Image: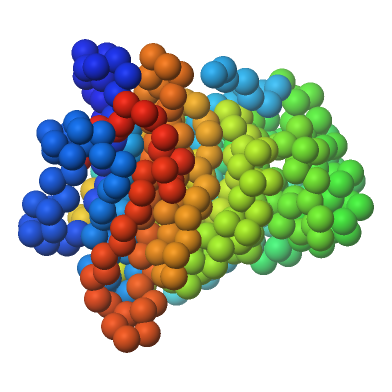
Amino acid sequence: MVTDAHQSHSHNQSHTYRILVLFEDCASTRKRRQRQQSYQHKDKRFSEKRKKMVMEMGDGDEAGAGACLFCICVNVKGLDNGLVLTPPMGWMPFERYRCMTDCVRFPRDCISERLFRRTADLLVSEGYAKVGYKYLIIDDCWMERQRDTTTDELLPNENRFPSGMNDLSNYIHNRGLKFGLYHDVGYKTCMYQGPGAIDHFELDAKTFASWGVDYIKMDGCYASERDLDKGYPAFGQALNNTKRPMVYSCSWPFYKSKPNYQLIKKHCNLWRFAEDINDSYESIANIMQIYHKQQHLLANHSGPGHWNDPDMLVLGNYFLSYDQSRLQFAIWAVIAAPLIMTNDLETVRPEIKALLQNRDIIAINQDRLGNPGKCILTKHNFQIWARPVEPINDMGIESFAIAFVNHGEFPQCPLCPQTYNVFLNEMNLVNPMGYTVVLK
Ligand code: GLA
């Protein structure tokens, strides 16, 4: 854990800071684990402050992708609402359950209060809430297609949410969780085409506050760029006017040809910058690439209270191998992404559940400096992603979380293990006193 590293660090030589290996992904065998233990702080090569670090990379896996997350081991100010000083963690149904509204044929999987009650129970009983997954967010397809004809208010779908939103909200809150809801800043919601917020900002914000909503996912379908630029700040203001603190998640940049992140950051707690994720390695790699291409811009605007959102964690579903699951979790931790799962918590495989609940990786994601990582080196099919994290040593130098990614695309042998040599200074690790690797 970072804290342990910090504590033990303070008892160590004051000018050495630690390399905490939080997550070793490319090694699936005991042999590899033993090999990597040679990088522990006891390793003479580190105490002799050697600069060269040799990492053997990637066993590869069934689909040829893997990642290693190493943690080598401010002031905090958020949006006016003071929320999400670290990235939010929770659960959202969309990638897994989409817009299934047929509860007769699919009673277990349809978007209904039953699904959210069951998930609330599982978040608690399966230990997810305890490690930080607190926000249970309902995505699209929860509403009636028409507003209330008398009051103009939004209405939850009568058949699928017969007990109403207050009842569901209480159920969620009574389990110590937070309640999130989807809406759209334009004329209609994206998939269900339910009523959008346009012309009803104050009313909808009041309705959400009266339902005890803690988090709004505000989509941007059926809106012009002008509508978006007017609508997102105006709805944010309407949320503020309710005096109920609600996390404000915007899809604003995704719908803009040239997003103004300065403006978006001023009004939103988080923002989607890429297309919808799906349950595949290709989708994850594509979103990583989108981030990579504009990482300086994105990282500059992210920090406590304001986060880049690369979309949900798809691990725990059908198609990712174990290594691919580790890849997503590692990179989402390093870039300080919201950790919002989308899966069936009842059927998540034990090893994926353990991964989702890995406190060391979560600690990297939740690092209080709120400094998002970047891809700092690309060579062929390898990438190195790095994030400065606590502890900071006496000289004011941060520790680092480092993720080694093997995209496994060597034409001769896509699934083979590879050796990769990297110098510490290539990763901007320039502490003259050297580093300690902490293996977990
Ligand atoms: C858009 C969003 C998704 C999801 C759907 C619902 O595509 O990007 O995350 O909310 O709408 O319709």
Q: Is residue 147 above or below residue 42?
A: below
x and y percent of residue 266 in the render? 76, 32
The residue positioned 37% from the left and 85% from the top of the image is: 411
x and y percent of residue 58 in the render? 27, 65
* Quadrant of the frame with the N terminus: top left
Residue 9: quadrant of the picture: top left
Q: Which of these two is toward me, 141 or 88? A: 88
Total labels: the figure holds 0
Q: Which of these two is toward me, 232 or 39? A: 39
Residue 77: quadrant of the picture: top right
Ligand 1 - quadrant of the structure image: bottom right
Tell me, yes or no, if residue 382 can be seen here.
yes
Residue 238: quadrant of the picture: top right
Tell me, yes or no, if residue 109 can be seen here.
no
The residue positioned 12% from the left and 54% from the top of the image is: 35
The residue positioned 55% from the left and 54% from the top of the image is: 311
x and y percent of residue 122 in the render? 32, 45
